[in-house]
Image (cartoon, helix red, strand yellow):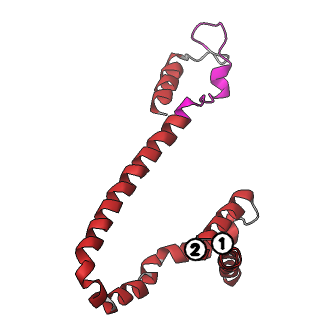
Amino acid sequence: MLKQFSIILIIYFLGDLMQKALGLPIPGNVLGMLILFFSLYTGIVKLNMIDKVSDFLLENMAFFFLPAGASLITCFALLEGKLTAILAVSLISTFVILAVTGLTVELVQKFFRKKPVKIASHIENIGNKGNNNESGRNTKNVHARENRREEVI
């Protein structure tokens, strides 16, 4: 597990180093996440190389928000006059994020619906034998299921 944690930590430090060296306006931890994503996508880092420590970190994510919450409590006097504005921005941004996420999901679904659905080989082998395939089974139900499957996808 120490090796897995070391991999994640090295990637984090690479992102932080990249941000400081290049002076990018993106935080180093975000760059580290992008590096991790592309490392996983290209196969440089395999999922089994970081899966246990990743699961641990995800399961205990709420624990890592405690310091941020405690610092908000200590700085409450600074936020007191701006509480309404902060609440308004939080609510508006939440609804904007929900709307953008919904639209993105719809666009992705429409994009994948346009791609042809690959059908199973036993359905492709249906010849001019009426409604029976090579094995002699009736394929009317297979066609009906395939049509329903295309509608769902």
Earlier along the polypeptide chain: callout 1 or callout 2? 2
Which label sits on residue 50? 1
**SS of the residue at dot 2?**
loop
Q: Residue 2 in the image: x percent, y percent?
A: 68, 84
99 versus 39 height, above or below: above
Q: Residue 70 in the image: x percent, y percent?
A: 36, 89
Direction bottom: furthest residue: 74
Q: Residue 75 in the image: x percent, y percent?
A: 33, 90
Apparent side of residue 4 relative to residue 57 in the rendered image (left or right): right
User: What is the span of residues highlighted in magenta in the rendered image?
Assistant: 112-132
Q: Residue at x 36, y 84 (%)?
A: 69
Tag 2: Cα neighbours inside 10 Å, few (<14), some, or many (≥20)?
A: some
Q: Distance between the Cα atoms at labels 1 and 2?
A: 22 Å
Residue 127 in the magenta stretch? The answer is yes
Quadrant where the image shows the N terminus: bottom right
Q: Nearer the viewer, residue 140 or 118?
A: 118
Q: Residue at x 49, y 30 (%)?
A: 149
Instruction: Name the residue carrying label 2.
Output: 27
The amino acid beneath tag 2 is: Pro
**SS of the residue at dot 1?**
loop
The amino acid beneath tag 1 is: Ile
Apparent side of residue 117 relative to residue 39 in the rendered image (left or right): left
Front of the two marks 1 and 2 = 2
Residue 35 in the magenta stretch? The answer is no
143 versus 68 height, above or below: above
Tag 1: Cα neighbours inside 10 Å, few (<14), some, or many (≥20)?
A: some
Mark 1 near mark 2, Cβ–Cβ under 8 Å?
Answer: no
86 versus 109 height, above or below: below
